[in-house]
Amino acid sequence: MRKIIVNLNYASYPIYIDFNLLNIKDIFYPLKKNDRVMLVTDTVLSPIWKNIVLGSLVDYGMIVDELIIPDGEKYKNFVSVELLISNLLNKCHDRHTTLIALGGGVIGDLTGFVASIYQRGIRFIQIPTTLLSQVDAAIGGKTGVNHVLGKNMIGSFWQPTSVIINLNFLNTLPKNQFISGLSEVVKYAIAFDYDFFVWLEKNINDILSLNMNTLLYCVTRCCELKKKIIVIDERENNCRMLLNLGHTYGHAIESYFEYSSFLHGESVSIGIVIALYTSEILGLLNIVDIKRIINLLEKIGLPTIIPKEISSRSFLKYMIRDKKNYFGQITLILPTSIGEVKVFNNVSKNIIMDAIQMCY
Amino acid sequence: MRKIIVNLNYASYPIYIDFNLLNIKDIFYPLKKNDRVMLVTDTVLSPIWKNIVLGSLVDYGMIVDELIIPDGEKYKNFVSVELLISNLLNKCHDRHTTLIALGGGVIGDLTGFVASIYQRGIRFIQIPTTLLSQVDAAIGGKTGVNHVLGKNMIGSFWQPTSVIINLNFLNTLPKNQFISGLSEVVKYAIAFDYDFFVWLEKNINDILSLNMNTLLYCVTRCCELKKKIIVIDERENNCRMLLNLGHTYGHAIESYFEYSSFLHGESVSIGIVIALYTSEILGLLNIVDIKRIINLLEKIGLPTIIPKEISSRSFLKYMIRDKKNYFGQITLILPTSIGEVKVFNNVSKNIIMDAIQMCY
Ligand SMILES: NC(=O)c1ccc[n+]([C@@H]2O[C@H](COP(=O)([O-])OP(=O)(O)OC[C@H]3O[C@@H](n4cnc5c(N)ncnc54)[C@H](O)[C@@H]3O)[C@@H](O)[C@H]2O)c1
Ligand SMILES: NC(=O)c1ccc[n+]([C@@H]2O[C@H](COP(=O)([O-])OP(=O)(O)OC[C@H]3O[C@@H](n4cnc5c(N)ncnc54)[C@H](O)[C@@H]3O)[C@@H](O)[C@H]2O)c1
Ligand SMILES: [Zn+2]
Ligand SMILES: [Zn+2]
């Protein structure tokens, strides 16, 4: 078992990573016998993995209630928030209860958000089941739900009590979801760690065939890299922004298609490619490195070109509407080499348009 | 102008107290020209005081939107939360915007809560207009809204950017609201400050006739006392509980009458009296001190006996349902002298019943 401690000023919590974590004694520490918990999961996961977690919780002597939310991003909203809160109140959960999120980023973000506002904040444990949530969403304490007028517009920073990353869960994850998660993995490598990038190039086939030991290293490395950033800048005033490599461009694709045609990681992959070409135009990155990165993304099976439906003009419009680009100024995270990225606030619209046009 | 700095580990913010604060240059610091703000107030305050605040904000060159919520505790709910969030999104407020709460505890709690969850947290300024919110609700960062299944069940800890306590606002506050607020003032004195209690006995007539200089001292002293507690124990794990003197008993009265017959401070006043008698039975407090406190409460015009409608048996039942009394255990804050209170977790139900029976 790998264990990473996330040390924040006011709290610290562990991330556990292994194949079969739910059998381990005290995995739910600091919970103890007779503590109450509310297990939250979705309709897809419920028949597959819920009973394993439930069994483990009951074995520890905990008193478990459960709530199953319909599967899908569109249920990451205020209605689900109210549903979970009403359930907690109806079953008389007080502020000593603990929420347990079993699922991908949707369940994790929703459950974490409710944990942050129920009776002014209660404990919650993340048990991420998608690759994306294991390497990204479950770590770092960003929680939230969507509003009809914008994604993730309502939320908080609320750190989990622990994160239990059970790699076995990935065995039932649909392949396209797994591949989508890999784009965040590649993102970490490009942004922070050349050696990890080289390792990915070498081991990508083992990863794609779900070799558990390879995955253990891969997921652990991503968690370590994200942890390093979070402990310096929990609230994204500063270096946490670097994690958005590919995302400013990617969000434009997601919102253009109203979150229906592309998975998050797929649009991030295209976003990374546009970022690479933006770097090239600015003279920050050479074409050899760019080809090398695109080659890895393609080997994984991730998209690397902009779908023809989006004109370059409307692409730019959607970028400007992104909540991070206030006052119309676009903040870009751009690679300066494989393993390093920087923040750029004043790239001209012409350069951005040129980079976009190189990616059709 | 009095200025109290609330120093927390991760932030510190000022409380300003005076008669005519809105004329003072830089009162909205750190806001600056061209910053966007959303002014939130209620239907009662809007025709009385809104334009003064609005004028002041506009004079500073800020870009102001406003939202007026219907007056009353029943609008401190999720519907108002969504209304405020939709307004912010519709008017494209990004995470650099600031909310300004102009009103009593209802507007302050609601606005603070939205500030804590809009785009994972934005700034907000408290401009409390009731005595209760000036000495209590606006300070300390407790925010929240009610749920049909319980009061203040949804909320967060989110500190304001500043608190602007303009005493002139009290000139239009209904007398019963003013008197209700005074019960929190007496609470501070009993709990923490004998000298302040003596000062209150001497100056109560000037306070009741709204002498501004007397009020300035009174409100400032309360803010200082609350500040001292918050900086030690922001999240009420410990000594912040002492601020609940009179509240465990008081909440039972409020919820028995479904928050309709008594104002908050009125039920707290009765709650304080029951706490006094509980102390007496336990041999912690003598009858001379008790009479002296009751005398002050009566001089103010606060109720000091339990309404006959509530039987002592149902009183106890409502106390046990309070969210702070988990596992049926009742936590009481009891005075040990005028100026000192302590936490008691194991007062027997018989003693509590006896104390209740002494207060009809
Ligand atoms: N909080 C953060 O820092 C952060 C970071 C990135 C993304 N996110 C959020 O995460 C969400 C996306 O998360 P996601 O990609 O995990 O999607 P998801 O939670 O919607 O899960 C994807 C699908 O896979 C199913 N599934 C999950 N685990 C499974 C398993 N082991 N076996 C079979 N099916 C499984 C789910 O039921 C769902 O249908 C978005 O809402 C995004 O905003 C948050
Ligand atoms: N956050 C905290 O720490 C904290 C502490 C105590 C109470 N509270 C909350 O505060 C709320 C009660 O607050 P409140 O007592 O201020 O009540 P309130 O906000 O409902 O105000 C009382 C009434 O007075 C009116 N009013 C306010 N200021 C006025 C003025 N200057 N002139 C004329 N009318 C005015 C209001 O419109 C309202 O009708 C409750 O919801 C309670 O839960 C919060
Ligand atoms: Zn992402
Ligand atoms: Zn009170």
Image (cartoon, coloured by chain):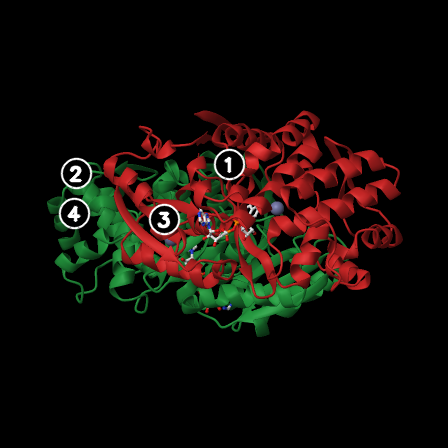
Chain colours: A green, B red
Are the numbered discs 1 and 4 placed on the same chain, yes or no?
A: no
| Residue at image location 73% in from the left, 51% down from the top | B249
Q: Is residue B166 above or below residue B176?
A: above
Mark 4 falls on what kind of element? Answer: helix
Tell which tag, 3 or 2, sits nearer the viewer.
3
Residue B235 location (% of width, % of height): 60, 41
Tell which tag, 2 or 4, sits nearer the viewer.
4
Mark 3 falls on what kind of element? Answer: helix
Cα distance in 3D space between marks 1 and 3: 18 Å
Badge 1 amino acid:
Leu
Q: Are marks 2 and 4 in contact (CB under 8 Å)?
A: no
Marks counted in the figure total 4
* Residue A352, numbered label: 4
Q: Badge 1 is on which residue?
A: B210
Q: Badge 3 is on which residue?
A: B48
Residue B303 location (% of width, % of height): 68, 50
- Relative to residue B137, is residue B83 drawn left or right? left
Residue A319 location (% of width, % of height): 23, 53
Q: Is mark 3 within 8 Å of ligand 2?
A: yes
- Relative to residue B136, is residue B68 drawn left or right? left
Cα distance in 3D space between marks 2 and 4: 10 Å
Q: Is residue A275 visible?
A: yes
* Residue A282, numbered label: 2
Residue A49 falls in image quadrant = bottom right
Q: Which corner quadrant holds the N terminus of chain B? A: top left
Are the numbered discs 1 and 2 placed on the same chain, yes or no?
A: no
Mark 2 falls on what kind of element? Answer: loop
Tell which tag, 1 or 4, sits nearer the viewer.
1
